[in-house]
Structure formats: C-alpha cells, structure tokens
Amino acid sequence: MKKIELRNYKDFLDNTIFIVSLLLGYVLQTSLRFINIKGITPIILLSIVISISMLQNMIISCIYSLIGGLLCDMAMNCIVGVSVLWFVIIAVVVNILTIWYFKINMVNFIIFLTVSLFIEYSIILLYKFILLGIADINLFMLYTALPSILFTILLGPFVFIFFLYVNNIFIHNYS
C-alpha cells in the first residue's frame, strides 16, 4: 500500500512540474518577452517538449507535446493545430529514438533540438514562400530563422538540465 501511495505522489509531482514548466515557458516566450534580443525569441516550449519526451514514456510525451503545441500555436499567432501536430510527431520520434537507439544525454538533446528546429523553420519557410509568396528566403533565414535556432540551442540545455535534475530526484527518492 505504501508503494502505491509513493507512486501516486511521484506522478502528481511529475504532472505538476510539467504543467508549470509548460505554462512558464509560454509566459517567457510570449507575454513577458523576458528573453528577447532584437525581436528574436527562443522556442522554449520545444525544448520543454523534447526534454519530457526523452525522459518520460510515450503517452506522457504525447499528452504534454499536445499541450505544448497548443501553447506554441497561441504564442505564435498561427493556425491552431500546426504546432500541435509537429510537437506530437517530435515527441513520438524522440521517444522512440531514445528508447531504442540513443542514450539520454546532452549531446542527443541538442541533436534532437537542432534537427527539430531546422525542420520547423523549413516548413515555415515553405509555407511563407511557396503558399503565400511573401517571404524573402535570405532575409528570413538570416534575420529570423538562424538567430532563433541559435538562441534556442543556447538556452535549451538549461531546460534539459532542469528536467534531468528533477527526474533524478524522483528516481532516487520515490522509486
């Protein structure tokens, strides 16, 4: 009976930390503009989703990537569902690769984050350039995509370290 109570407590703390982290990431990414250099902000929610996907199981990864995607769609003022679909795909792929092929470490986190960001900005570029015909490829890549990618890659490891630390605390104290 004691083991079940500790497990429920751990699950409650995990879920609370994930929700608070997603909401804090949303606030930092949008309203406060706390982390903003010349209009360029990192995609903090993507770092959070990848961190959760590397450290948790598939169901939890998908649930929180869905929430993170909705928050990202609201933050970027784009069509609702685009980031949701993208974040869920990222969560599934990262979770499968972490389970079967890759270890949970900083290098793999940065690889997942970098690949995800380049694919995301490629999709945005294709949408703006091909469908809308309004994007200048050079200006978009030089002044929007690359600074945001670099900024996210620089701040993303701090997010991953936080989740790794929290995960290690729960493994040692509540397993």
Image (cartoon, rainbow, N blue to C red):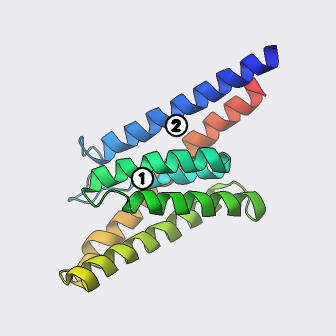
> In the figure, 115 relative to 92: above or below?
below
**Residue 64 vs residue 137, the one in the foreground:** 64
State the mark number for residue 129. Answer: none
Crowding at mark 2 (Cα within 10 Å: few <14, some 14-19, many 20+)? some
Q: Nearer the viewer, mark 2 or mark 1?
A: 1
| Whole-number angstrom distance, CA of label 2 to CA of label 1 | 14 Å
Say whether residue 153 is visible. Answer: no
Where residue 151 appears, as percent x and y from the top left, is 38, 60
Where residue 150 appears, as percent x and y from the top left, is 40, 65
The number of discs equals 2
Say whether residue 163 is visible. Answer: yes
Give the image quarter of residue 120. Answer: bottom left
**Relative horizontal placement of residue 105, taking residue 78 as reference (left or right):** right
Direction top: furthest residue = 2
| Quadrant, the C terminus | top right
> In the figure, 7 relative to 91: above or below?
above
Q: Which residue is mark 2?
A: 18
Q: Which residue is mark 1?
A: 69
Give the image quarter of residue 137. Answer: bottom left
**Relative horizontal placement of residue 51, taking residue 150 as reference (left or right):** right
Q: Secondary structure at mark 1?
A: helix
Query: Mark 1 and mark 2 in contact (Cβ < 8 Å)?
Result: no
Q: Amino acid at mark 1?
A: Gly
